[in-house]
Image: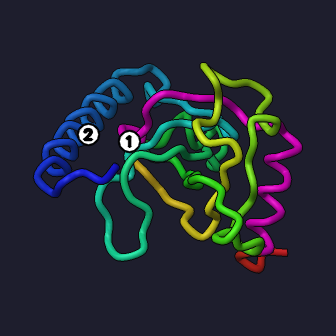
Amino acid sequence: MDISFDEWISKKNELDKLSQEHFKKKLQHPNKHHPIRPYRGEIFVVEFGINVGFEFNSLHLGLVLQNDTGNTFRNTTILIPITDYKDGKFDKYVNIKLTNDDLESKVLNGLDKDPSKLKLEDIRVIDKARLGVKIGKVKPVYMKVVENKIKKLLSFD
């Protein structure tokens, strides 16, 4: 559900404050660890906010792509947005199908839309304040498929 611009400004201010609180906690930690530490392969509810044109918007799930060391120390993380799977809108070059069977662990019922799809063309860096509830973690074999598809998409192979 899209939110109005005014609602987004209010939400953004809340997220900015939360980000600053996280940063202060990080500075107080003896090893400078960030208080929010997602792990690679975990899936979270993410507030993408209001963006421009065809950029990803609003609340959606996201798969954490950044490595665990980066997630321990950084204020941001790298993730892949997840949306509902529609056969007519599935591009095998930039999408990967995701089902609850691809999860090694899940919270509550796992994916809210099963099947879903990863949108590799929309890889994003986000502040960890945008992360909401964790809903699960993908199996290592699935994460390997994601890595290989990204290498091909970015011509890293």
In the figure, is residue 154 to the left or right of 123?
Answer: right
Q: Nearer the viewer, residue 106 or 36?
A: 106
Residue under the point 61% across and 62% down: 119
Q: Secondary structure at mark 2?
A: helix
Residue under the point 67% across and 55% down: 117
Residue 153 picture location, percent across and down: 73, 75
Residue under the point 65% across and 29% down: 110
The residue tagged 1 is 130
Q: Residues within 10 Å of mark 1 (few under 14, many from 20)?
A: many
Q: Nearer the viewer, residue 18 or 33?
A: 18
The residue tagged 2 is 15
Q: Earlier in the sequence, mark 2 or mark 1?
A: 2
Quarter of image, res 141: top right
Residue under the point 30% across and 53% down: 2
Q: Is residue 80 above or below residue 15?
A: below
Which residue range is magenta in the image?
A: 128-152
Q: Residues within 10 Å of mark 2 (few under 14, many from 20)?
A: some
Name the main secondary structure of what is drawn in magenta.
Answer: helix
Residue 123 picture location, percent across and down: 56, 62
Q: Amino acid at mark 2?
A: Leu
Q: Amino acid at mark 1?
A: Arg
Asked if the stretch drawn in magenta spans residue 57, the answer is no
Q: Is residue 56 above or below residue 21?
A: below
| Tag 2 and tag 1, C-beta contact below 8 Å | yes
In the figure, is residue 71 to the left or right of 105?
Answer: left
Q: Nearer the viewer, residue 135 or 25?
A: 135
Q: Nearer the viewer, residue 70 or 77?
A: 77
In the figure, is residue 90 to the left or right of 34?
Answer: right
Residue 34 picture location, percent across and down: 45, 30
Quarter of image, res 112: top right
Asked if the stretch drawn in magenta spans residue 134, the answer is yes
